Amino acid sequence: MDAPTRSELLAAYAIERQDDSTALAVAFAITTTCLTYVIAATAFFTDHCQSLKCDGKIPAWLPLVAPAVAISFVGFLVLNVAASRMRSVHLQRLEAMILLPMRDGRFEPSFHSDAGLIYRPDRPLAPPRIRLVFATITVASYVAWPLTHRRFVYERPGGLLPR
């Protein structure tokens, strides 16, 4: 690889690595904000609704739209974490392209994040095989979530579906 190309790749690598280093702080901030909202909303409804029904103390639409804020935070968190994982995989590929041999026989850059554990369909059975656990959890989540959602939103006593 020629020097100008390597220099451009190193510059891109430095920017992406810096952005990757803030991903955990952003995810923590989103999670904290979401939990704060859930706690405040729970306290509000506990204070204003002494039983399962609010008896006209608050508008009927408010309990229905209250979860929308938390859902948007969780959606943003999911997108942020997915982008961070994709960036980590991209960084690993950049590292492989710009490896520089050191005098002691090592190669740099050699920073590795937990993205090496994430399941990638381009090499499904490549080591470490723990990647298959992530794939299994993902599939199980997409199967379990609709069933749980249906049970607790629609089929519970007082739910949206009549018994």
Image (cartoon, rainbow, N blue to C red):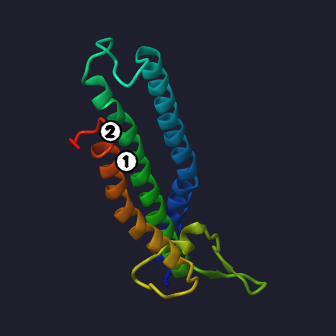
Number of callouts in the render? 2
Which marked residue is nearer to the observer: mark 1 or mark 2? 2
What residue would you read off at disc 1?
75
What residue would you read off at disc 2?
157
User: Does residue 39 lie above or below 160 as drawn?
Assistant: above
Question: Dot 1 surroundings within 10 Å: few (below 14), some, or many (20 or more)?
Answer: few
From the viewer's perspective, is 47 left or right of 69?
right
Q: Position of residue 42 (x, y in %)?
A: 47, 27
- Residue drawn 25% across the image and 21% down it: 60
Q: Check disc 1 and give the amino acid type.
A: Gly
Closer to the camera in the image, 98 or 56: 56
Question: Dot 2 surroundings within 10 Å: few (below 14), some, or many (20 or more)?
Answer: few
- Residue drawn 44% across the image and 48% down it: 77
Q: Position of residue 112 (x, y in %)?
A: 62, 70
Q: Position of residue 160 (x, y in %)?
A: 23, 39
Furthest residue toward left:
162
User: Does residue 53 lie above or below 8 as drawn?
Assistant: above
- Assess whether mark 2 and mark 1 are in contact (beta carbons under 8 angstroms): no
Closer to the camera in the image, 103 or 36: 36
Q: Secondary structure at mark 1?
A: helix
Res 4 visible: no
Q: Check disc 2 and give the amino acid type.
A: Pro
Res 104 visible: yes
